[in-house]
Image (spheres, rainbow, N blue to C red):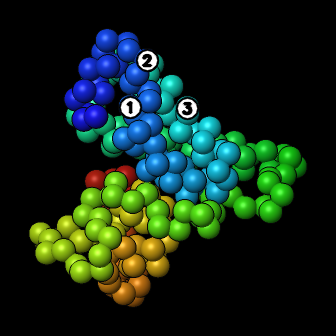
């Protein structure tokens, strides 16, 4: 089912909208939340919370890019859960039995799949506009929480190229934020 059809189900308050979201984006949302949370159970809860938030927000919200909208909700929910977990640890509540937080689960090593701009499964690099490759590396590393190795493998480049690109992008971002008075 296409995004516009799913959004129409939301507008009509048709409960088939949630299974349609699950079918179209469930695996990618689960992989994103699992990458951040490290626990399949927590990831599943995060995805369910994402669907509920979408149900409560659409309408009146009218997302232009449905997956981007859903992944932002999912990512924010996962990061909030991590924040609560860290706060609990500071208060002496402890974490999971293995002490992991935000670790990549071995069952999902490949990451979110095709949901990242420019993602391809074959190692042959894309011909991109200037800066597009840096943008792709930055998003994969900091939005989708992929490791440098995963970014390099998915994009068909060396780890050192990814690291250098990230370093330069961070430097440019810092300079921009300083210029705008948003960074001391």
* Mark 2 to mark 3 CA distance (whole Å): 15 Å
The answer to whether any part of residue 36 appears in the image is yes
Q: Residue at x 68, y 45 (%)?
A: 41
* Mark 3 to mark 1 CA distance (whole Å): 16 Å
Q: Residue at x 35, y 37 (%)?
A: 69
Which comes sooner in the sequence, label 2 or label 1?
Answer: 2
Return the residue found at the far right.
92
Q: Which mark is residue 15?
A: 2
Relative to 121, 87 lies left or right: right
Residue 172 image point, x, y percent: 29, 69
Toward which corner of the image does residue 165 lie, by quadrant?
Answer: bottom left
- Whether label 2 touches label 1, CB < 8 Å: no
Q: Residue at x 27, y 59 (%)?
A: 117
Within 10 Å of disc 1 (Cα), the crowding (few <14, some 14-19, many 20+) is some
The image shows residue 141, relative to residue 62, as above or below, that is: below
Within 10 Å of disc 2 (Cα), the crowding (few <14, some 14-19, many 20+) is few
């Amino acid at each position: 089912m296409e995004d516009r059809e799913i959004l129409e189900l939301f507008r009509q308050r048709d409960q088939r909208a949630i299974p349609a979201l699950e079918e179209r984006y469930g695996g990618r949302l689960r992989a994103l939340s699992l990458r951040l949370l490290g626990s399949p159970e927590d990831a599943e809860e995060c995805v369910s919370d994402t669907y509920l938030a979408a149900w409560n927000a659409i309408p009146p919200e009218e997302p232009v890019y449905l997956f981007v909208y859903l992944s932002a909700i999912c990512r924010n929910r996962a990061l909030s859960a991590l924040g609560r977990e860290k706060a609990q640890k500071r208060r002496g509540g402890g974490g999971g039995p293995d002490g992991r937080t935000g670790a990549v689960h071995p069952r999902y090593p490949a990451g979110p799949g095709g949901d990242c701009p420019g993602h391809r499964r074959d190692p042959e690099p894309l011909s991109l506009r200037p800066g597009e490759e840096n943008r792709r590396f930055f998003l994969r590393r900091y939005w989708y929480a992929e490791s440098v190795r995963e970014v390099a493998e998915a994009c068909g480049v060396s780890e050192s190229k990814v690291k250098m690109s990230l370093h330069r992008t961070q430097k440019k971002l810092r300079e921009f934020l300083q210029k705008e008075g948003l960074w001391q």
